[in-house]
Image: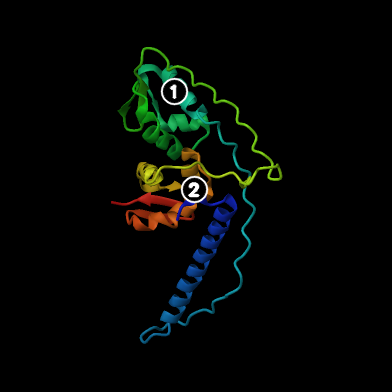
Amino acid sequence: MNLSQMRSADLTLMVRLLETREELEAQVARLDRQLAAFEPGSSSRPRPVSLAAPRPRPAQPAKRRRAKRGALTATILRLAQQAGNAGVTVKELAAKLGLSQNRVFNWFYATGKHVRDLQKIGEAHYAWMGTAPPPPRAAAPPRRAPPHPSAPGNRRSATPRARDAKPGQLKDSIIQLVKAAGQSGVTVREIASELALSPQRVYVWFNGTAKSVPEIQKLGPATYRWID
């Protein structure tokens, strides 16, 4: 399955179908438990199982605005420099930035390890060892607006696609983030935010490619962890 050639509408439909399949599998599991009560030696009488349509999901809370690309890196490095040799912990950074500790820890594992002057001095404890602050990040050039679908000569779809990744690169990046999250696990949205991808694309990856990685275990709805 080449996800880079799929439209976002197709990815959204695939996610809905996968969620519906999970709900149906949960109903089948309940039915199996009910049927097991009729086997010899069972004294409990099963309760009737309702096969009504799934209840509508409650309205999701408003999404928190995602920081611009590079803003999180600049903020963490600035706070580390201000802390000096005493350093700063992941917990302190998460409290100051209003983020989850998993998000900050994943940043250190994926992006922070490439910053030579940022050194680990303890458990989830980092300090800035450089003599000068890093150079400011260059602003990205403004993007041109895509042509209207009805414009002459425009034969491509106007639907934006997720950022393309090299074969195997997406798998390696996601596995690294799942490993770094530890036993508490990491959510699909956190991975999508860290890799600048749509949650739909990450969700489809877990329901496709991830099934061939037995060390990845599902903890709950859209939450996964790494088991050795």
Q: How far across and down, in percent of the image, does residue 188 sit?
A: 48, 48
Q: How far across and down, in percent of the image, does residue 181 sit?
A: 38, 43
Residue found 54% across the figure and 26% down from its top:
140
Which tag, 1 or 2, sits closer to the chain's start?
Answer: 2
In the displayed structure, does residue 175 sit left or right of residue 189?
left
Query: Which residue ends up furthest to the front in the rendered image?
Result: 153
Q: Within 10 angstroms of label 1, few (less than 14), some, or many (20 or more) residues?
A: some
- The residue at which mark 2 appears reads as 4
Q: How far across and down, in percent of the image, does residue 81 sit?
A: 42, 18
In the displayed structure, does residue 111 sit left or right of residue 61?
left
Find numbered disc 2 in the image and state the secondary structure of the residue it sits on: helix
Residue found 51% across the figure and 45% down from its top:
189
The kind of residue on which mark 1 rests is Leu
- The residue at which mark 1 appears reads as 77
Q: Is residue 216 visible?
A: yes
Residue 208, relative to residue 185: is it above or below?
below
The kind of residue on which mark 2 rests is Ser
Tag of residue 133: none
In the displayed structure, does residue 124 sit left or right of residue 104?
left
Find numbered disc 1 in the image and state the secondary structure of the residue it sits on: helix
Picture quadrant where residue 106 is located? top left
Q: How many marks?
A: 2
